[in-house]
Amino acid sequence: MRGFVIFYFFLLFLNTNVFSQVEANNWYFRDSVGISFIRGEPEIINFKKFAAGGLPASYSNKKGRLIFYGGLNKKSNKNEFYDSTGNLMLNSEFTNGNGSVEDSSQGFKLVIPHPDTSDLYYIFTSFGSELYYSNNISFNFSLLDMRLNNGNGGFNKENTVKKIIIKENPGIATIHLTTALHKNQKDIWLISLVHFADSTFFCCYKISKNGINTSPVKDFISKNNYFYHFFRISPDNKKIVFSDSVNNFSIADFDNETGKIRNIIRIPCKLTKGNMLNFEFSNNSKFLYIIQNPLKIIQYDISLSSALKIKNSVKTIDSSYKKSIFYPQLAPDGRIYIISALDSFIHVIHAPDSIGKYARSEKKYIKFKNKWQSGFPIFPSYLFEKKTILISKPCINDTTHFIITDTN
């Protein structure tokens, strides 16, 4: 019996320390509030208030404690980043190089930790879903150094903003960014989805201990006049999903060793025009969730072998919302959280790795004091991957072997 009790508590230890990547424990919203998962269940927390625009950024350390947060101050049109105590970080008030790197309502920040040290963080900035005109189609990044300012962190004043040029032509474009873990489990892929003129393509940049390789792996997607608005990488780094029209979405294989996009299949699905920030995966990468219109959540089983089977696997999770919902985001607790426009509530899908009704959608799961309009910070999807434990000989007085499987 004593051996069984030890075995039970060992499983509890594994559940809390192996399955969650705690760097995404603290979510900052642009209205001075956020939620923390440091105790397991989400708790409302308060931050130093500033008038942030777009989607802010926040990141935590290996122990799950907040390191920094911030975003674009829409009053000054400058970035502002704060340490965990709410103090402004060194040289963190800066413009994005061209004065208009992001629209205050649509632009966002993506934080990627340096592959070789826990002291450095890349902060990438995208224009979001707004169209813009530029002499060069590009996106910017800054390097946050936690060794500066006596360990409180900051930016090097002489080299605050750097630019990665995708296309050396003037024109109208949209750029979105996300990230995936390399197959070697150390390096990271920065992935951009770019629509320029009448062509759409992916650019994948490898980030290693030597920095960013600015010569990307490029994959042409299509030639049309539709502006792609959003895309996601699955937590296991093997699938990529994006909208290719208001009547379809596409799923493709992502090769996280080479950075190539392969085997694109298109699934007919009526989407919401002008609001494509509506994809999210389950933490086991088996199910895809889509906000099909402002009031409805549907689920697809993307582990199936054909486009027809995936299409026919569709299930309605919830169609009873009264206000528009968007920004589904997987969390460290394995749930998917969803927000409503101009509302004081966050909704939830409790078990997104379960099929159909067993996913359990719940409205008004978290309530804030005031109404707010913001999105969740964007984190690397691989932080939320659910590992699997294989147990052999789980009998009393026998040697028990634990194997944590890794799908990458």
Image (spheres, rainbow, N blue to C red):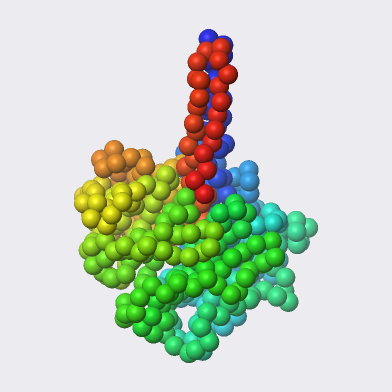
Horizontal side, residue 207 vs residue 294: left or right: right
Extreme residue toward the right, this view: 150
Q: Which one is in front, 192 or 134?
A: 192
* In the depicted structure, whether residue 337 falls above or below residue 355: below
Residue 40: x and y, percent? 50, 38
Q: Position of residue 265 (x, y in %)?
A: 31, 62
Q: Residue at horizontal 60%, vertical 53%? A: 184
Residue 16 visible, this orientation: no
Using the rendered view, name the quadrant where residue 261 is placed: bottom left
Image coordinates for residue 157, horizontal then vertical, percent: 72, 74
Question: Which residue is located at x 26 percent, y 42 percent?
Answer: 356
Place of residue 281 in the rendered image (x, y in percent of width and height, measured from the top left) = 39, 51
Most extreme residue toward the top, as rendered? Answer: 1
Q: Residue visible at 52% across and 68% down? A: 204
Residue drawn at (58%, 19%) of the image? 399
**Location of residue 313 with respect to 82 vertically, above or below:** above
Residue 147 or residue 10, whichever sits in front = 10
From the viewer's side, name the closer residue of 50 and 134.
Answer: 134
Can residue 403 be seen by looking at this rendering? yes
Q: How many marks?
A: 0
Question: Taking 305 as reference, is 135 above or below it?
Answer: below
Q: Quadrant of residue 130?
A: bottom left
